Amino acid sequence: MNKFVRFLIIVILILAAIGVFFGVQTMIATKRSNEQATQTISESLATSTVDGTGQSDNIYKLDLPTATTTAPTTWKNYTSNRLGLSIAYPSNLVLSPPSASSSNVLTLDFPKEVYFHWPLQDEVVLSISASQSCPPMLIPAGPFVSTTTFSLNGYSFTAIAGDDAAAGNRYQEIVYETHANDTCYHISLFDHGVNGAGFYVEGQALIKKYDDQHEKDMAVIISILNSITSSLRLQSKNVVQ
């Protein structure tokens, strides 16, 4: 075996070793990322008590609307005869009403530059629908979905919250449902964002700063969801066809 062949074999072995090393490092990093996402979701559910049926007495870290929850008088008012309801909402939300050519869904978009701070600027949409049966959640049913009930303004609501993470993304959904006039009125807040400030900045202190700010931003949005729900008024007769 000449020197060139030996040299070629050595180079191939070195490259193979390097490939194996980086492959193992990638697997470790992916595992750690998945474990971190799972831990984040598990911690958020730590306050939720779920029984064998998947029911929960308290949705994780979620402040539900109460009898004292109200909508500011400065908000806009909107009535949909098609859905048979009226609501109040902040003027800086982008409202898209239902139409005859679309499904019976009213949507309200939260401008990310208004409601979030850099770098975690989520996409948040609140939708309100009226249909004969309640639509499924966008978050798949699983261990990170919990339910409870509450009463508000004479309406009995079921509250459902879900949390999911994948490929660096985080998804959260909060649903309030009430039944009247043989109709399911479905209010859904869907949030999509990056799973943590660590994808943008380095250093635990800086990461914590931006993650904490994101939690505060989401608390404001949930408060708006609750106030919109508090403003909900249903017509005495369902008009959805």
Image (cartoon, helix red, strand yellow):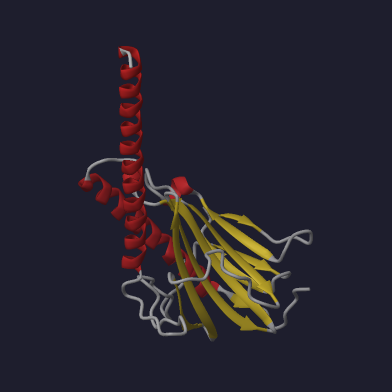
Outermost residue toward the top? Answer: 3
Residue sitting at x 32%, y 13%: 2
Q: Give the answer, above or below, for where 237 lies relative to 22.
A: below
The residue at 48%/66% (across/down) is 225
Image position, residue 101 (x, y; %): 79, 59
Which of the image's four quarters has the N terminus? top left
93 or 192, which lies in front?
192
User: Residue at the left extreme?
Assistant: 205
Q: Residue, x 78% and y 73% (percent of image)?
A: 241
Can you give x and y, in whole percent of width and height, for residue 110 in the image? 51, 54
Left-right relation of 112 to 202? right
Judged from this view, the residue extending furthest toward the front is 1
Instruction: Report whether residue 229 is seen.
Output: yes
Image side of residue 237 versus residue 126, left or right: right
Number of dots carrying numbers: 0
Q: Position of residue 61 (x, y in %)?
A: 35, 70
Residue 115 in the image: above or below residue 118: below
In the rendered image of this protein, does residue 215 appear above or below residue 119?
Answer: below
Could you say which quadrant of the image residue 126 lies in? Answer: bottom right
Would residue 235 be found to the left or right of residue 75 on screen?
A: right
Q: In terms of image quadrants, where is residue 180?
A: bottom right
Q: Residue at x 72, y 79 (%)?
A: 238
Q: Is residue 71 visible?
A: no
Taking depth in this image into account, of 126 and 92 the one nearest to the observer is 126
Query: Looking at the picture, how far across and down is residue 120, in whole percent?
Result: 39, 47
